[in-house]
Amino acid sequence: MVIHESAEDYLESILILRERRGHVRSIDIVNELGYSKPSVSIAMKKLRENGYISMAADGSITLNESGLEIAKRVYGRHKTITKLFALLGVSEKQAAADACKVEHDLSEETFRCISAFVEKNGSA
């Protein structure tokens, strides 16, 4: 199944927020990403309908197995690419921002090579 970059960003954000806060609600995503409440609400509905997330009666959001798999993949790519940029001398903040821009578009081959390079040359 093809998933759009924006959906990957939402799933990744849910994973990050869950790690940071222990629980996630739509308002947390609004605050994290800076999107409007209606935009996040629509996105959560689509993610729920596609089986990537579940929402409890209290509004808490949980990643389902398929959503968690995608979120971990994207976040793993993000962290590895951020490390690569940091190894090149890019500031941590800029490295993370730039990693967000490229994490979705790299081929598997290029990402495997980046991962091998980062692993061989140490983490930043």
Image (cartoon, helix red, strand yellow):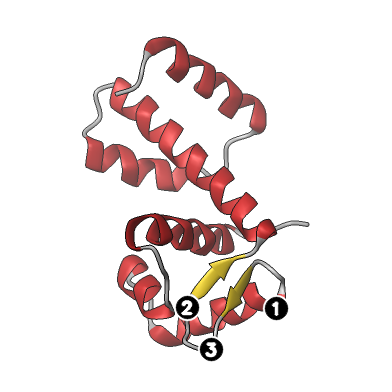
Q: Position of residue 91 (x, y in %)?
A: 21, 34
Residue 113 found in image quarter: top right
Residue 48 found in image quarter: bottom right
Q: What amino acid type should be assigned to the residue bearing mark 1?
A: Glu
Going 42% across and 71% down the picture, which residue do you hit?
24
Q: Position of residue 69 (x, y in %)?
A: 64, 50
Picture quarter with the N terminus: bottom right
Q: Secondary structure at mark 2?
A: loop
- State the residue in front, 43 or 24: 24
* Sequence-earlier tag: 1 or 2: 1
Could you tell me if residue 28 is visible in this image? yes
Q: What amino acid type should be assigned to the residue bearing mark 3?
A: Ala
Report which residue position mark 1 lands on. Answer: 49
* Sequence-earlier tag: 1 or 3: 1
Kindly indicate whether the residue at mark 3 contacts the one at mark 2 (C-beta within 8 angstroms).
no
Residue 85 found in image quarter: top left
Real-space Cα distance between discs 2 and 3? Answer: 7 Å
Q: Position of residue 64 (x, y in %)?
A: 64, 64
Going 38% across and 25% down the picture, which residue do you hit?
84
Report which residue position mark 3 lands on. Answer: 57
Q: Position of residue 74 (x, y in %)?
A: 54, 46
Q: Is residue 65 left or right of residue 102?
A: right
Q: Secondary structure at mark 3?
A: loop
Report which residue position mark 2 lands on. Answer: 60
Neighbourhood count class around disc 2 (C-alpha, 10 Å): few under 14, some 14–19, many 20 upward: some
Q: Secondary structure at mark 1?
A: helix
Depth check, mark 1 against mark 3: the one in front is: 3
Q: What amino acid type should be assigned to the residue bearing mark 2?
A: Ser
Going 36% across and 42% down the picture, which residue do you hit?
98
- State the residue in front, 18 or 105: 18
